[in-house]
Image: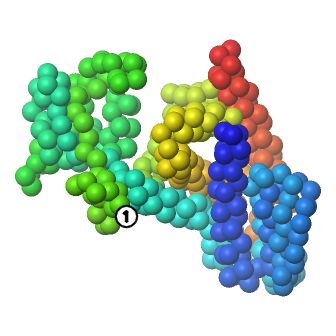
Amino acid sequence: MSIIIGILIFSLIVVVHEWGHYIAAVKSGVLVEEFAVGMGPKIFGVKRGDTLYSLRLFPLGGFARMLEEEEGGGNPRAFNNKPVANRVAILAAGAFMNAALAFFVFLALNLCRGAYVPVIAEVMDGSPAREAGLAAGDRIVAVNGSRVNVYSDYQFAAAAAGSAPLKLAVARGGLVRSVTVTPRLIKTEDGREAYKVGFVPAYREGLASKEGGRIGAGEAVADAFFQILFWVKATFVGLCGIVTGAFSVNDIAGPVRIVQTVGSAYNEARVFSAGAVLSSMAGFLGMLSANVGIMNLLPLPALDGGRLVFIFLEVIRRKPVDPSKEGLVHFVGFALLLALAVVVAVNDIRNIAGV
């Protein structure tokens, strides 16, 4: 079941991404020859206007094939013959749709399930937080100089700091003060040890809850937006860590490990209710959709960001890059990305097997 759910999540993310390209292409007057759901041999297809809408055998994403996307030719409806602004919009539309999907998923979760907020609800007796003078009602606005908009920002910064002191900017009664607190190694509820400062974050209930402390509509919208920004930051921090050597390829979680994580979350959630399963899987959908959108805009060959680089070069040079040279760069880039995907998949399997 975890494999099926993982495939469905990835497929939905890719289809939404390609749908963004499709909509932007149609609006720009580009001929989309085929919009496919799935990959591999065609099972079913119907032509509407100039576009073939098809369903393919393997439920692994999909694609929007545009007319002469690589070479252009002399057709005014070809992708490469459109103005720069249109081509940029078409390439960026996929990531935009992934961000939009993530936003609405996070918003729905906030409104239905609720969300943790960076406000202290309770301070544990004898904890570093108590010794530092933190109290219920304090809002954490920054950690070590990094802005905190959602509780995930605090968790990310605290995890990165480990046992090092945390310099918190805390709002209380309309005033912001600086507090330094040093985490201690304690046992968590699941039996593991982790560095904690000893406070419980506030939780805003969903709108359907009959309890007090429900999340406001504006707060839910803001939280969903800042969740997107959080994943942008987290992704770039991870990429910088790989470039600087702080992280290795072994630290990258590929599709295999992600599916395993989805499966573990599914098994844990189904013990409680179908709603818990839906909530948990929706959380993965939002997170992965945000990450896919961000990754696709990286300036790497074969990705949308790499194609945007060539368009920007065209603007600077005032003439297009030779299509054959651009095609070669994308081909080599695709081969390298495929090789990286194989390495990551092998590492995933080794990590799961404990080898």
Identify the image quadrant of residue 353: top right
Q: Around disc 1, counting alpha carbons within 10 Å, would you say few (fewer than 14), some (14 to 19), or many (20 or more)?
A: some
Can residue 169 be seen?
no
Quadrant for the N terminus in the image: top right
* Residue located 66% across and 75% down the image: 24
- Say left or right for 318 vs 147: right
- Say left or right for 93 vs 323: left
Viewer-closest of 351 and 143: 351
Outermost top residue: 355
Q: Amino acid at mark 1?
A: Val
- Say left or right for 244 vs 91: left
* Residue located 84% across and 67% down the image: 54
Viewer-closest of 217 and 273: 273
Viewer-closest of 48 and 98: 48
**Does 73 appear above or below 149?**
below
* Residue located 81% across and 65% down the image: 36
**Does 49 appear above or below 157?**
below
Instruction: Give x and y (percent) for residue 267.
Output: 57, 35
Label 1, secondary structure: give it. Answer: helix
**Does 107 appear above or below 51?**
above
